[in-house]
Amino acid sequence: MPIAEQQSDDVLEHFGEIVDARRKVKRKEPLFLNGDQFTALYAVRTGVLKTQITTSDGRAQVTGFQIAGDIVGFDGIASQRHACSAIALEDSEVCLLPFDRLEQLSRKSPAVQHYIYQILGREIVREHLAMLTLGSMLAEERVATFLIDLAERLHARGFSRFELVLRMTREEIGSYLGIKLETVSRTLTKFVEEGLINVRQRHILILDPAGLERVYNPQAIR
Amino acid sequence: MPIAEQQSDDVLEHFGEIVDARRKVKRKEPLFLNGDQFTALYAVRTGVLKTQITTSDGRAQVTGFQIAGDIVGFDGIASQRHACSAIALEDSEVCLLPFDRLEQLSRKSPAVQHYIYQILGREIVREHLAMLTLGSMLAEERVATFLIDLAERLHARGFSRFELVLRMTREEIGSYLGIKLETVSRTLTKFVEEGLINVRQRHILILDPAGLERVYNPQAIR
DNA sequence: CGTGGTTTTGATCATAATCAACGTCTGTGG
DNA sequence: CCACAGACGTTGATTATGATCAAAACCACG
């Protein structure tokens, strides 16, 4: 959901007080890296980022994609160091929300405090749903879920609901969904053959949204 | 980590103000169900709970197991309704932390506010790690991770680091790890054959902690 | 225009799921 | 206290899904 929908005038007003700094991040550059000191949350203004964990033995797991209106950096709150890395998938711009100031502010303004609890709570629910996808879905269901979720989020930002441009590679999608890039590719091809979508490189056209939803929600009626 | 380690005296003192109510939950009974009105967080005093999401088509995904010292209920913050269900795996007791009072309190006390951000942040990191497990590990690695994580958490509460009693079924473990109950069973058997653990029903004895860690962290040195 | 990263597609393989049978433990009521 | 029912767990045989390996096509970019 866009920030604007979620915050009262009070919140907006107070946010004005702290959103002084912006930062540009070039494609493939990190906004922050695993282990970096945590100082601020970042509100994405333009562009797309990915967040990922990497283990000592080189394994990586993409934990999310953030588009305009999303907030990144929650992973640093607990230990004051970022537990994952955030990388720009295209040239992007973010607003800094210094966390100490957020904390101060949320003492003055109940609305701000409530808003911060809201976004943290939303992140927790988002991750629960990601666990559901990763833990109990077939490859086709994962890809369908991914496309619909992304389309809805873009639509909430005023983009088309049925046309989307993927800023991430098949490999990054696969990592996020717990499958391999070849499987992502094959699944997209299958959806094309079934008339559910069109694919032209990274441009996806959703032809049959209901059909796509039926992939992971086979029998809504019983 | 036990709550006690994390909170200053200030937090403890203030928490005394709101922890008025306790609630007992019998084995297999819900503490709350998906869709229930969200009013409070719950601190587990004794016993063990599981949280799970269930989809309309009956699929279920266990999203976590909570033992003494853990806090449950974050999933309700975002929408004021619980996004998952919490079920007791044995007779348990929880403290109620009414959320509106927590919000009030966190305005008065920076320490309380900070503490709440901490636990929400920790939950987010915990879920990131669960995504890593679900998204990029083999069955053996998942089970090894699960055993070590649980053993460490129990140890932080003063229990033995090497002896644990599983309060959950093989099916619940499997759901949490994104594998089937038969796979959990086979994997445990394999670990026994390799001399890593002993299994007597739900009693697990970790014989070779380093060996168990090596299952999912093959080459610590490089 | 190459050159390198990305994507598609095919063939084969491995891991874990599924199906099935049996064994074991627990709790309950006779 | 024992017998029994039902839940839970183990093990085996087979299958299915997606991984892996490999090659070719495609595109973007310098």
Image (cartoon, coloured by chain):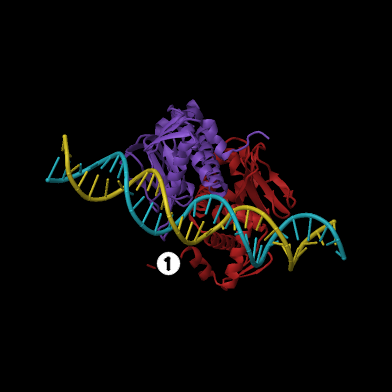
Chain colours: A red, B purple, C cyan, D yellow
Dot 1 falls on a residue whose secondary structure is: loop
Rendered residue at 37%/50% (across/down) = B33
Is residue A221 rendered to the left or right of residue D20? left
Q: Which is nearer the eye, A87 or C20? A: C20
Give the quadrant of the C terminus of chain B.
Answer: top right
| Mark 1 neighbour density, 10 Å: few (under 14) some (14–19) many (20 or more) | few
Rendered residue at 40%/32% (across/down) = B17
Is residue A30 rendered to the left or right of residue C1? left
Rendered residue at 52%/52% (across/down) = A134
- Where residue B137 appears, as percent x and y from the top left, is 56, 46
Is residue B183 rendered to the left or right of residue A56? left
Is residue A147 rendered to the left or right of residue B66? right
Rendered residue at 66%/33% (across/down) = B221
Q: Which is nearer the eye, B61 or A100? A: B61
Q: Name the residue under label 1.
A: A219
Q: Chain letter of disc 1?
A: A
- Where residue B129 appears, as percent x and y from the top left, is 55, 43
- Does any portion of residue B81 appear in the rendered image? no
Q: Which is nearer the eye, A49 or A185? A: A185
Question: Residue A76 falls in which quadrant of the image?
Answer: top right
**Residue B22 against residue A179 in the figure, above or below:** above
- Where residue A127 appears, as percent x and y from the top left, is 53, 49
The disc labelled 1 sits on which kind of residue?
A: Gln
